[in-house]
Image (cartoon, coloured by chain):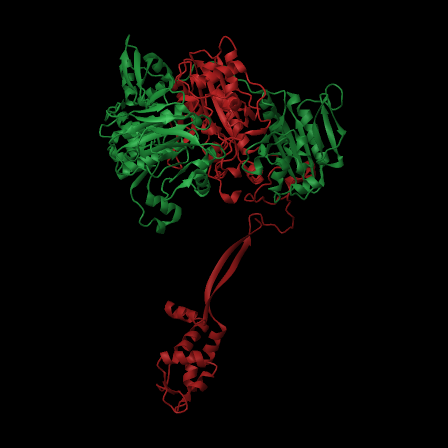
Amino acid sequence: MIIEAELRSTKRWELTAEGEEIAREGSHEARVFRSIPPEGLAQSELMRLPSGKVGFSKAMSNKWIRVDKSAADGPRVFRVVDSVEDEVQRRLQLVQGGQAEKLGEKERSELRKRKLLTEVTLKTYWVSKGSAFSTSISKQETELSPEMISSGSWRDRPFKPYNFLAHGVLPDSGHLHPLLKVRTQFRQIFLEMGFTEMPTDNFIESSFWNFDALFQPQQHPARDQHDTFFLRDPAEALQLPMDYVHRVKRTHSQGGYGSQGYKYNWKLEEARKNLLRTHTTSASARALYRLAQKKPFTPAKYFSIDRVFRNETLDATHLAEFHQIEGVVADHGLTLGHLMGVLREFFTKLGITQLRFKPAYNPYTEPSMEVFSYHQGLRKWVEVGNSGIFRPEMLLPMGLPENVSVIAWGLSLERPTMIKYGINNIRELVGHKVNLQMVYDSPLCRLDAEPGPPRTQGTA
Amino acid sequence: MFHGWIGSWLYLADEEFDELCFEFGLELDEITSEKEIISKEQGNEKAEGASDVVLYKIDVPANRYDLLCLEGLVRGLQVFKERIKAPVYKRVTPNGEIQKLIITEETARIRPYAVAAVLRNIKFTKDRYDSFIELQEKLHQNICRKRALVAIGTHDLDTLSGPFTYTAKRPSDIKFKPLNKTKEYTACELMNIYKTDNHLKHYLHIIENKPLFPVIYDSNGVVLSMPPIINGNHSKITVNTRNVFIECTGTDFTKAKIVLDVIVTMFSEYCENPFMVEAAEVVFPNGKSYIFPELAYRKEIVRADLINKKVGIRETPENIAKLLTRMHLKSEVIGDGNQIEIEIPPTRADVIHACDIVEDAAIAYGYNNIQMALPKTYTIANQFPLNKLTELLRYDMAAAGFTEALTFALCSQEDIADKLGLDISATKAVHISNPKTAEFQVARTTLLPGLLKTIAANRKMPLPLKLFEISDIVVKDSSRDVGARNYRHLCAVYYNKNPGFEIIHGLLDRIMQLLNVPPGEKKGGYVIKASEGAAFFPGRCAEILARGQSIGKLGVLHPDVITKFELTMPCSSLEINIEPFL
């Protein structure tokens, strides 16, 4: 500090221009009073005087004057009293004489309201020598330069202080998409849990692998044109594993493997129909079929995260394509308790610890359970996934041993991502219409960390 | 939707009822009323005077037809709570003549199956009658697959006289007064009239354009119904009907029998002899005669230790038998004391395997009471190599300053062909047969349109825009079992006031560096060679050859392409198949 400056402000009252005039000439009402002769004055004439309008009403309310409306040539104004005491003028003269403190608070504010007085704040600075007081002049440096470093001049130079409240310049960088950042984390969780990734790079699937292999009957509503995208070209699968197809056909139409079957006329042409897979469970079915061909049976843990397609009505939470996350464990003697145990570990890694299981119906799992977690924000239990043990009618025709159970669960990738990043409309997350600023601004995906404040519309 | 206080039927408060639903596998969506629904949808004024009666919105598992009506739901929950024992449903032969339905061979080509039964001396009330109608509607939507597989007709038997004939006739030869109409129409006329009927128009396609329409007559030639469209008005049931003749016709015999069983088990409760159903005889065209409803009880034997092992619990066989009995599956321990004999009633068509029985035992035990455990399965995890490579590349693409886009795999033909200056036949694209809009006509054969559309939606963002995506495209491939396959592509675009070919070229060099592919044609290196492409500006397109094969193209986009994607600035792009680098 070269110098120090101390602010010392004072307040005082001053007359306005009108106030000055009144202090000099008297108040408007006094001037009106004085201009009325003993024989009175026509009101119209009085109103024409410079102080007429204001002075008339004030003089009336002070009861200094009266109006006679019965006069022959229009209303006439007469004095009521002989003389008057001009208080306004007197008070203003007091202020003018520097004796404003002699007036009461109420009197001052009345005069201020009449715009005759104003309060003036006078700011003064008391200047004194500072701790670094110097009489020689030197310019502050903004930045350190290579020359300063080599010459050592930085030691003697003053530097301009930084404004640490200003924002930094964001680095030029590329950004990863938030949904795929979440996908990476889910892959990581499965890998940490010892699950092997299944191939899912086949969006086109036959109805056979998508439905029939899963013991989903051919009249099932999901196989309706309204729910599934079928293909016009190529309309039919060229090859199917026919031995296995026959076992599937028999199980659907007649039963077997301890099942009553669905007892209907199973049609190969229905199974050949190509479609866009409606779930990644078709890829799981292929993986389990491959597993069944390996003898002897070796236990397996599989996972996949990839796109699935539904011919659905689109809304804020539904798109025609979304990502499905699926986990599968195949081993001897797996129980419902094991399924729940695996789900508990899996969801704990997502930061979800309060779980509840509800009986449910899926065509290809039995028992089936929906997974619910308690949502602190919504204050209710919300469904976070679906799970079950694959039906023997699905597994045994594949050739898996009878005492092998396969537990599985699935959830969508979009839903936890929307919750994680506070996004309400799925179109703000997926597809070409997303705001790239959202992608640029999205934080790291740390599923087990406490969620931050929800993203507001304004930051998008 | 269920009318009335179900909770109070069961003497339960709403919270307890909610809890019970969850435990039983039902979803209590909402407790509301007609008034509340109307007021929510159309405002308070319209709701004025609407019913205050409490409605329960409950989601029932799709395979539990026995829980679709209040009667069945309450019965199921009462048995579950051990308040009542599961009733025994019985088929009885009438003292007098049995009702007969004769199927003629003409039905074979249109709707070959029919089953029938009689509810004798039933007592409806307004609520019961409404529930009876509602159940039929729910079954029609559900197991009957919108009447395509099965259609139900219920009739006032006292207005009819058997035997009945189920036949098929030319539409012009069928003439009757349909339900709630005052005059007679031919079937042809009816099909026209119902085209504008918001309810019935959805079912017309099932028989439309068929030479013969199914129809059921009584012995006096009265039309009972023209399934699956409409019943006759003559035999219309009312709240005062005492004897109900039920017929179900369809193309799926199993489902027709299930539907009939569900209706009679649910509503025989209101017959003079509760849960007794009067048999009807159906004579098939081959002369064989069957008695319906089947009301078959099936016995299964399951070992208690199997149930324990599948669920992960340790209950005695006696306890398991009790659990199953609560689920409407009357069970007892037999044989060596470890076997459980389970009786599957006609209401539980969903039980087709021991695993269904295991699930019921688990539900009655309480899913949330099961001890959790971790499987001892020891496995070594592996990544799918293509995804592993994708993940590695994604990070380095972002490190190279490009931002990841996530676009749709489905798009319009225009996106992948017309807008890129290509003919659709040259794309080898797979085509969707039933798209609801043009956005879902084909699976993409290139990632470029998605990235260009992303830029178009973000034109207000500061330039340059540098985007990439690594994802799958789909093309026809007859060497694959389904006749199509995916390829994993990497696509990048640079959008700025200058085309920036050198930037996209530099990105290619960087990608090749990351993939350890040296420049030059030798030693499996890469080169770019002048080429042509409809999407590129002439003389500004090169083919990328790596490891001895063409992997894609890069170049400056053609102004027509830029314009067609509603862009205004020059743009260069790169798209390669990354599978050769696995």
Q: Which chain is red?
A: A
Q: Position of residue A293 (x, y in %)?
A: 52, 12
Judge from the rendering whether residue B485 lies leftward or rightward of residue A294; answer left or right.
Answer: right
Q: Position of residue A164 (x, y in %)?
A: 55, 43
- Closer-to-camera residue (A51/B84): B84
Q: Is residue B254 visible?
A: yes
Q: Which residue is farthest left?
A: B272
Judge from the rendering whether residue A190 lies leftward or rightward of residue B65; answer left or right.
Answer: right
Q: How many marks?
A: 0
- Residue A67 to residue B393: above or below: below
Q: Which residue is farthest front?
A: B220
Q: Is residue B144 visible?
A: no
Colour assignment, chain B: green
Judge from the rendering whether residue A117 lies leftward or rightward of residue B328; answer left or right.
Answer: right
Q: Position of residue A445 (x, y in %)?
A: 51, 31
- Closer-to-camera residue (B56/A252): A252
- Closer-to-camera residue (B266/B292): B292
For residue A154, what is the image quadrant? top right
Judge from the rendering whether residue A23 lies leftward or rightward of residue B315; answer left or right.
Answer: right
Q: Position of residue A67 (x, y in %)?
A: 37, 85
- Residue A225 to residue B302: above or below: below
- Closer-to-camera residue (B140/A143): B140
